Amino acid sequence: EIVMTQSPETLSLAPGERATLSCRASQSVSTDLAWYQQIPGQAPRLLMYGASTRASGVPARFSGSGSGTEFTLTISSLQSEDFAIYFCQQYSDWPLYTFGQGTKLEI
Amino acid sequence: QVQLAQSGAEVKKPGASVKVSCKASGYTFTSYGLFWVRQAPGQGLETLGWMSIYNGNTNFAQKFQGRLTMTRDTSTSTAYMELRSLRSADTAVYYCARPHSGDSGPFNIWGQGTRVTVSA
């Protein structure tokens, strides 16, 4: 099983600031890496796939980078609606895709 | 629009079984596989397994082998996940999720989730 590790566990920032979230895979997943946003009480929402491709409707302030084992999700200027929990997911090891434990982005 | 609509919350006793449904709409049901994912309270996301809607083939995570079944009814565009021999650790929100393309890739469509509570 590919283990995904996210850091930090919690990130405290103010609206307008830049957020940088990290995700590390225990072995290479190439660019088979997705990011999801989850608001408590809701299902996750796909933000990014292929490590750096924004999903439909995702604002341009979200960007992703990385390959192999190290990945980053950046939110350039935080809006109030961005404060949520973010998960990374590898989809290289089909079908047993694994998720990171999440980063809580709080005001 | 493309949607997955899940059945309502369930409360079960330890040792019982639960069957959750996931009804698809807005796309050709047999053109995509379906995954099931769960999230324990305050925890992360865990993939239970995958089912081919086209032919019913399944592939489960090792830890669920023997007590997990996935089925589908193509006439009603509905998929089902049944988990048996429930224990308290199975308390979670269960999601069905459709991959971005075919049978693989990230999940761009999610059901709203079904809360399953296992308690004596």
Image (cartoon, coloured by chain):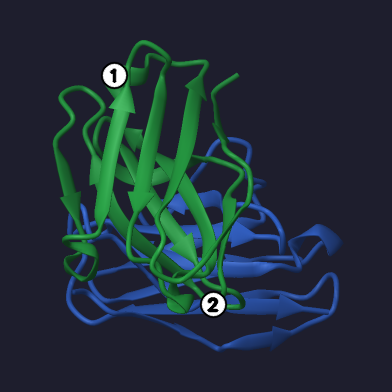
User: What residue do we see at 49% from left, 27% from top?
Assistant: B23
Q: Amino acid at mark 1?
A: Thr
Q: Position of residue A41 (x, y in %)?
A: 71, 59
Asked whether B89 or A68 is in front, the reply is B89
Q: Amino acid at mark 2?
A: Gln
On screen, A104 above or below B37?
below
Tag 2: Cα neighbours inside 10 Å, few (<14), some, or many (≥20)? few
Q: Position of residue A52 (x, y in %)?
A: 42, 54
Q: Position of residue A57 (x, y in %)?
A: 63, 37
* Residue at disc 1, secondary structure: helix
Report the side of A1 relative to B111 (left or right).
left
User: What is the letter of the blue chain?
Assistant: A
Which quadrant of the rendered structure holds the N terminus of chain B?
top right
- Indicate the quadrant where residue A12 lies: bottom right
On screen, A44 above or below A30?
above
- Indicate the quadrant where residue B78 lies: top left
Residue B51 in sight in this render:
yes
User: What residue do we see at 17% from left, 60% from top?
Assistant: B66
Which numbered disc, 2 or 1, marks the residue that appears first in the sequence?
1
Residue that numbered label 2 is attached to: B43
User: What is the letter of the green chain?
Assistant: B
User: What residue do we see at 48% from left, 24% from top?
Assistant: B24
On screen, B52 above or below A16?
above
Residue that numbered label 1 is attached to: B30
Report the side of B93 relative to B104 (left or right).
right
Provide the chain ID for the residue under circle 2: B
